Structure formats: structure tokens, C-alpha cells
Amino acid sequence: RKSRSSVKMKPRSTAHKTECIDMTYSVITPLDKIRQRHILARNYFTQLPGMMEEMSTKVKELPLPRPKEKIIVVRQHPQEQQQQLAVDSNEVISQCPPSSGIYLRHNGNCYTNNGSFFTDGSIRSTPLECVLPGATLNGGQWIGPNGTVPCDGGNNQNVQCTTGSGASLSVHINPANGFLEAPGDGQYMCCLPTSCSTPGTNIITATIFRFAEIESFTVADLPSDMTVYPQEYKLNCIKIGFHDYVITMSISNTTLTNYPGSYCKDYGNTCSGTVLVSSTFTIRYTVDITWDGMNVSNGAISQSTTGDQMYQCRVADHPDANENRTRTLTIKVPATAPSSLTEVNKTATTITVSWTALDSSDADGYVVNVTSDTDTVQTVQVEGSSNNTITLNGLRGGTTYSITVRAYQQLLGPASNISVFTHCQREGIYLGYNGNCYPNGSYFHDNTVKAVIKAISCVLPGTSLTTGQWVRVADTSDPVDCNSNSASDPFLCTNVTSPDATLNLYLAQSLPAAQEGWYKCCLPTDCSDPNTNIIFANIFRFVQIASIYVNLPLNMTMLSQNYTIHCIKTGYAYGYNFNLQLGDIQLTECTSPCDNSYLLHNSNHTYDHAVTITWDGMTVSSGSISQSTTGDQTYQCRVADHPDANAIRIRNVTIKVPATAPSSLTEVNKTATTITVSWTALDSSDADGYVVNVTSDTDTVQTVQVEGSSNNTITLTGLRGGTTYSITVRIYQQLLGPASTISVQTLPVINSINWTLVSSITQLNNTQYRIDCLTTTDINPSTDVYWLVNEVMKSNSKYIYTSINVLTYNNTLLVYPDLLGVLVNVTCIAMIGGVNYSQSVILHAPSGPPNNVRGFILNATSIKVNWTTSSETNGYVIEYTTGGVTRNVVSISKNEIVLTDLSPMSTYTISVYSYIDLPSVNSTVTVLRFDVPSPVTSLSVSNVSTTSITVNWTIPSSDNYVTYYTISYTPSCPQLSSVNETVSVGPHQSTTTYSYTLIGLYSGMNYTITVRAGNVLGGSDPRSIYGNTLSIAPTGVADFLFLLQPINNLTWNEVNCSERNGLITGYTVIISNSSITYNLTSTERYIILNDLVFGTEYNISVAAVNSVGRGPFSDPIVVEIGIVPGPVGSVSSIMETTWGVISWSVPSYIPSDYSIITYEIGYHILESGNCSMVDDDDIDIQMLQFSNSTNDDTFINITGLNDMSCYIFGVRAYTDNGYGEWTVISNETLELPTDTISDNGSNQGMSITW
């Protein structure tokens, strides 16, 4: 061991240095193994002289192997300890083979450490090779637990050796011979290049084993810091080989492991070990141990123990236990506690203790633990078994400490303990009692000091007692006799001469009333010595008031003021009466136990009766009890034992309070941020100082405490400009007195802010406004004035300032509207004393433009513009532009203006802006063109009924100056006239789509509808559309019925087109006589009646039919069926420009008795077809114009014809029996001459057809 000659103390937080490794060997240690090898060698080489001496020398020279299970490491840094424990005896090196040094090689891996483990099965097929690079074999050998392994022939327990090239020897188990025999199980030694008996040969060891083996059994994480308690560490047992086994770890007869099942299986890792090498079934099992100084425990398993702790790991293959492996390790633990633990010295902050030192074989050092109550104060590690004294620093005076000392080796041992009370103070006399310190003037109840062990200790640290004494203050001539007692002197005392002078006073009998009261202790000499040290104690009967004091408010700036009166009662545990009063008013009264009391010391029944008082400047109150008072406040505390009142104790306390308020409180000066006030100063006996309180409204702005009674003027700073403050001044001593108050208003920082229109409002967003902000001269305008325009800071270079007078600056800013229709909020900010003051002015703009802006063209140079009046406006700006030239005009009219002197035939863009202070946002824009409107577009009809049609149309948006529309509608019936309607509209309507409903129309009628837009300059080109009203049944009748005989062709006229009510699709003919009535239908305006009976009279009526229904029947005609004449012959025509002569011959057949009455001629213009090629079917009965000729004339002159037109003519004869058939001819009129030409007969023209 490393010897130590000095004490090394380590507080808990100090890191431990890594020192020399101490090693404690277990039952089976590396040294034991080496000794076994020594014995083996001795057995095998007894025939060689001097072999034993050389072998002993060799063994001593061998480096100790490093398997971790063979070394216990103590006081090593945890990180280094973990590094060492991580070293595997079967460690494989990265460089294989190494360039130098003896090594083992197996299955491609190289091992340079001693003590590697190999199962017999692993070296059956793959030999274990021992190699020394660069050497030549010269008698090298393998030696096992059963002696030398023969090479190149034979075997030892089935282990045989083979010589390789260079210095190389391999051992293996010959498969033909089976497995390793039990005597061959154990550690083997390889020596190269010479035999093991040769001095200086190279040696390496390995373990070749059967079944299972314990590769290592180690302790890990031993505590490096001995000050931590309880202590924790780990046991690691590493098993190698055979996969089914039983493993246990134990101390004494207590097994610390509890694995599931009866044995462990590596297949499935049933015991939850840590797999290190799966191929060799190398598994680490760990047990966590906790040591509390008496017991070691792992979870619920516990075992009491003293002294060294010996642990055992056992591994046996399952189920046969062919090999039962056992390893043990020992952890050094002191068996006994340090003896003779004694207090050597103490002060107010230190304690020195010592104990009997242990031998170095029994202790590495000591751990000293210091506690107060249950709290650990400090823990110190003392290194070295001979270091048996320690001084503990940093303690508290007057405190009882429990000091525990334990010896430690690898773990802590049992404890010794003492209790030590530190001095109450570093120097000077003090009182001590029952482990507590007491100041001068302390109170002690007589019942608490009636034994020597309850004595009051009077101590003077660091001095030796000479003639010290206790003396009753009431009779200083009669000191306490420490050696005897009597009624007049009931005390005894004991003393300590050194190192601290001490006199311990206690009652030896009852304390008479005459003997209670104040006693003084004098040390180290008697009280007659003027240089002695003196301290007082009050020893009393029943109860006593130990003290009365007041916790006064520290902050004089707060009102109301709260303070607490403490009346400390001590003594008499069973009952007492307590009350506190001010003058004649009792503030509180109780009989113990009292709610307002707090136990200070249980040993002497000391209670603090605390009463909290509230003082508002006029009244003191406690709970619901209050009392008005002025001036000083004197409180009386009364305590008496209950119920007999043997001792009535009364003590008073007075609180100094000013009786009057400061007089002549006056304003001296003021600025925007300061107010100076003064008042009449008081004498120092009446005031300690003053408290000035400043409020604004009900908020306290600041409260200032002015110390000194003569300081009667104060300047209050940091105030706000233009603010009224209430200033209150009170005198204070221990509490505040009455108040004087005045009201003062600071000067304003910003006097006003106004705006002025600089330019015309017609400049719109270029309109300029000047903002004037008047501020106090207490500021620097160039650095302390800022402008915000719509919350955007403006550069200081954008404004100027001028001085108006000594008190006022005028700060000026020019602004423009940023956007039309957006208000401008201008804020002037003046900063003074870190406080910003601001005033704002808002330039208002209307919330929107004028509504419904319209323009009316009055004439070629004037327009009237009107709009809907805005609810918020001071006027309007009208802007009108043409040809890039813009003019503005201001109008204060409510809603219109006439613009004159305009340019004819020009297009004007007119904008109207309303304004309050600023112009409105983008106004409605009206574009007016001095011209007639454009034609309407998108003409359509909708909402068609039997008598109405809605007409819809659109005008170009640029034509919003239209003032009327003319709607003309013409029915398809030629007998009806066109109708014109005019609709007036307001220009600038919000839509360009219009509609108008035509009413009172004819049903089923086709209309041509024409729409024209117009203004004062005229109308647009027309636009037309066709529309049909819905049909109803015809309301007109077919008239002029005529039956042409002899063919009985019944004809009739069309229904009047205004009464058709739709397209006529056919006719219904009703025929009746005296015996029959029947109907016939026809889609034409005629019908051939084939079944009429000659000589019979018939009634015939006709009704028109359309898609909706049938109309009324015509008045009937009465006809008698007879014979009608035949057609006329030889029809010819002679045509001129506007007339023609038609001639014919009489019919070839004229019925007898029915002469021709007249001839009927019908004609109409042939609208289509070839004029020279017509037949009877081309004549349209509906279109015919009729003329008649007498029966004597066979020609007729027809006038009123159109020139250059093709006409078709028909002629038929008429008798009383009816009409004959038509005979048709066509011809074309001539062209009218264009010039007047003399007519000599050669220029006559005529068209003749036949």
C-alpha cells in the first residue's frame, strides 16, 4: 500500500483523483494460478538441477495477467474503472498477426493477453496456435494442469501438440480421441522458443476447459465518492461455453439472484443476461448491490453483514453438472466503528473532533457527516487511516450538530456519533439554555431552571474562569452562593474553567416572590471588576412579558399604514389572560389559547401575541374596533396568569406620530413637467421628514419621502403637461401625520393644433394644407417635435418652426391628400422628459362621391350636370375635360350646375367631387358627346301575351346622354295604322339596358317594332324587330258570300285582318234547308258544293278558324240552285302607263229565262311569276279589286294602275242564278315618260294583249 502522512479531506462535490491501484486477491487469484503452474513445473522438472530456483525467478518476473475478475479496484475514477472492466481476457487484437511478441491465434483471431478461454470443442477441428514472430523453435513447450503436452505424437488427457514453422506450437483435441479429459481441464502455459524452464523464455497462458466456465467474476462501479450513502455497486459474472447451465451469485448462505426456471438456456436467453459473444456463448450476468452500512440488498433480497463482504459466483452445466465452477471475490469493509469519538474544541462556526485511529489494514480513511436536525450540513472524506482529527468549518453559532464518523476501505463501515453545541457567538459573553442561545435581557421561567441539567449557562468563549459570579440586580451586595442555597438565595451554580469560562445557574428550591427578577452574570471575574463582562437574565414566576415591540412600516410613502404590535409572553403553560389597549379602548383581549398568538419556544412556553393595526392618518383600527387619535400613540400590553392573577405584568410602547399637518403649503413655480411647492418647516422634535403625494384624478403619480424636518421645499419632476395634480404633504415620525393639500395644473406642452387651406380646393389631390402646432418653449422643436400623417412618421426636414413668444413655438407642416376620399389625420407629437404629448387634427373627406351624377345637353355649348346631394359635404368640385384640356369649377349648390361655353361636337368627361375639408374619392364619371345618340343594339322582345309585348334594347355605355326613346309599332294588318310612343329617360342611368311594354295590341297580330334613341340634338337611326302577339279565336266574320252556279262554287271575303286574331287556317261552312243541316270545311275561301239539289233553296253561313278555335258564323245567304252562264270568251287588253281597256265576248251559253245582268271584272298586281304565262290558278280572289260592266257592254276602261306593273285580269258573267267562271288574262303597263316630248304621233306607245 501507498503510505500517507497527511490528512486529505474531500468535500462531496470534489472529484477524486485516480491514484495507485490497490489490489485485493480473491480465493482464486492470478497469483494462485501462477503458483499452480510453478508446482506443475516442479513436478515435471525435478530431474533438472537448479530448476526450482530458476522457475521461481521466472514466475516472479511474469507480468500479472489482466482478467478483470482477478482484481478489485478501489478509489479509482469511475471512467477509468469502467475502462479497465471493459478489458476482455479473450480480447482479439486488430493487427493479426502482430509483428512482435508472443501471441495465440485461433480461428483467424489473434490474442496477446494472458488468460484467454477456449472450449475443448473449439480446438478439436481448429488447433490453438502459439506463435513468437521472428524466432526459431528451440525446445518450446505447452504445459497444462496435468503436465507437459507431448508434441508430434501422443497426448495428455487427449490434448496433443503439433510443431509448426518458425517458433510455433499448436495444441488441439484429436477428434479421434474424443474430448478433453477432466484432469486436462484448466490453465495451460505456452513457452517459446525454448522450454518453460529456460530463463528469459516467452510465456503466454490460456484456459482450455470442458462444458461451462466462469471467464471472470468482478465488482464494478464501486463508489469513488465515499460521502454518498447508501452505497451502490455491481457484481458481474461472465459465463462462457455450454448453453444450458445453472448460475448463482451469493453472499454467505443468501442467494442474490433469482432467475426464472431451474436453469438458464442461452438459446432464447431465458435468464436475460447480456450477450457478449454469441459464438462462444459468452454471457454477462449483473447483480445490483445496495449497502446501507448494515445490510447488502438486491431488490427484495437482503442479508445483514459486518466486515469484509465475500461474494461467490457458481456456474454448473445442466443437467449433469460435469463441471461445477466457483469463483469468489472479497470487498474490504471495516468491521468496527471508530472508537473514542470526542469533542476537542469548538467556536461559534467550527467544531474539532477526534477518534482512535485504526490500523492501515483496517481502514483507508474516514467519512465525517454533520447534520443539524435531519438536514445534512456537510460530509467530508478524510484519507489515511492515521488521520483521526478534523475541524469542521462553516457552521452556525448556537446550533446543536450530530457528528457521525465512519471508517472506509472499499465501502463504508459502522458509525460512531456525538452531539456538539457550537458557541452562540465568536466572542463576548452570552447565555445558553437547552441547546439554544439567548441574548442579553432574556427571560427564564422558574420551573424551567430547577435542575442542574436545566441550568442557564453564562459563557465567555476563549477565556479561563477566575472569579466570575451571578448577582441579583436588586441586591448587588449579595451574590449567588454557588455552593449552597436558602430561601433568600435559592440558586446553585456549576462552572467550567477552560477553554471557555462558564457559570451554570439553576434553582435548587422554589423561587420566592422577593427573589424573582433580574440577575446578572459577570465573567471571567466578579462584578466588582470594572473590566469584567456582564450579561442580564430575568428569572420569574408564573408569567412575564419578555418584550413589547412594534414592526413599523418601512415605507412611509404608503397610506394606509399597517404595523404590528408584538407582546411576547413567556412562562406559565396552563392559562393566562392577555389584552392590548390604546388609551381607554381595548383593541384585543383573550384567555389562552389565543387566536392571535404564535408559539416561539415550546420549552418556556413563549408566545408572540401579534396585533395588526391600520392607521389611515386619523383613525387606528384592528378588525372591527377603531379609535380616532392625534399625535403619539401609546399602547399598553397586560398579561396575568389565569385564574388567580398571581403575577400581573404590564408594559407600554409609544409610537411617535405628528399631531398637525404642514402649514402654508404653497405653489412656488411650475413648468410643463415640474411643480415646485413649499411649506413651513417644523422642528426636528416634531418631524423626521415629510411625504409628498402627487395624484391625477384618482391615480397616484408619485410619492416622495423628504428626509429631514428642515427640508420644506420640493420640485416634483416627470409630470405631464397640461395636467391638474393634487399635491398632499404629510409630516412623518414613526407614522404619518395629518395632511395639507393644494391643486396645481402644469403648463400645457401643446397649446393647440389648427389647419389652413393654402391652395384652391379645385386642385384636388394637389390641394395644399398648412398645419400649425403651438408648443411650449420647454422643448427643442428640432429634436423633440414629430409629425404623424395617417400614422406615418414624417421627416423632420418636412416642417419648420418659428418662435411666437418666450413661451410658444409655432411648428408648421404642409400636407397634401395622399388619396382622394381618404381623411388625413395629422398628429403633432412633442416629447419632453421621455413622455410624448400629442394633439391631432383631422381633415375630413366625404365617405363617398356624389351619387347619380347625370349630364343633360341643353344646347350645342351647354350642359346641365346634377347629382344626389351628399349628406356630409361643404361643396362640390366639378371637373370637365375635352381634348386633353381640363377645367375645374367650385359649386356650393346642393345638387346641380350648368357648364357653359363648351365646344360643339366635342366629347366631355365630367367628374363631380364632393368635399368637406378634402375632396371625395373617385367621383362618378360622365362622358358626354355633343351628337345624336348611337342606334340601339340587342333589340329583342319578351313577355309576349295576347295583347302586349315587352321590347328590350341596349345602348352603348358611352351614350348615357340619351333623354328619350321613340317606339313605333306597325301591325301587319293594312287596315290598321302604325302607333308611335315616346318614352323619356334620365341620362346617366346605372344601366344601359332598357325595356318597354306595348299594351292594347291586337291578338295574333304580327307587329313591326322600331326603336330610336334621342336627345335634344335629334334621334338615332332606327332599329326594328318583328313580334307576334298570342292568338285567340277569330272575332270577325267572313262576309259577301256568293254561290257561283252552275258549278256551285261558294266564295266569301276574308275576315277583317284586325279580327282574325291569328293566322286563319280554314273555314267551316254550314248548309241547311228544310230537311237537312250539315257542315263542310275548307282551307280556302271557296268551296264547291257538289250535292246541292236543283230547284232547292239553301241557307249557307261561313265561320273562320285559326289555331285557337272557330269564330262566329256569318249572316246566312239564301240561294236557290239554278243554271249559271258559261265563261266569257275572247278576253283581250290594251295597256297604257296607268290605265288599260279590257274587252271580251258574251258567253257561249246563257241559260234561258236567266239573262246576263252584268259582267264582273276583277284584277290585282301579279307579285311573282312570269307576266306572259298565267292561268286561272294565279288569280288571288282575296287581292282582287272589282269593277262591273252592264250587260250591254263587253269592254271596260280600268284606271289608277301602276306603271311598269304586271296585272292579272278576270272577267265573269252574272245572272240571277249566280256567277259564271272566271276567264283570265295578264298584261304589263307601260313606263311613264321621263321628259316632255312633242307628240307628232310617232312617240305614242301602247301594250296590247289577248
Image (spheres, rainbow, N blue to C red):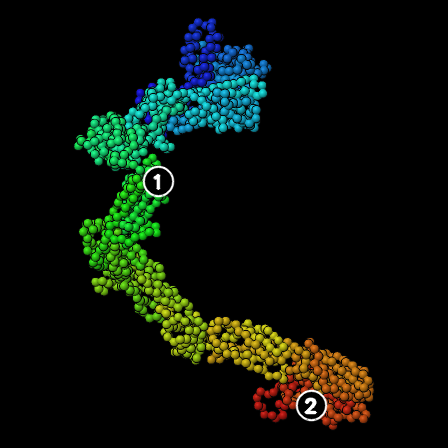
In terms of image quadrants, where is residue 774?
A: bottom left
In terms of image quadrants, where is residue 263?
A: top right
Residue type beneath disc 1: Gly
Residue pictured at 33% horizontal, 38% vertical: 572
Circle nearer the N terminus (1, 2): 1
* Mark 2 neighbour class, 10 Å CA radius: few under 14, some 14 to 19, many 20 or more: some
Give the camera-side residue of 1050 and 563. 563
> Which quadrant does the N terminus fall into?
top left
- Asked if 871 appears above or below 1151 in the picture, the reply is above
Disc 1/disc 2 C-alpha distance (Å): 156 Å
- Callout 1: SS: loop
Total marks in image:
2
List x then y, in percent, for residue 537. Answer: 26, 35
In the rendered image, which residue does mark 1 sit on?
575
Residue pictured at 21% horizontal, 64% vertical: 805
Question: Would residue 208 be visible to someone looking at this image?
Answer: yes
In the rendered image, which residue does mark 2 sit on?
1187
Question: Would residue 131 be visible to someone looking at this image?
Answer: no
Residue type beneath disc 2: Ser
- Does residue 1210 appear to the left or right of 822 in the view shown? right
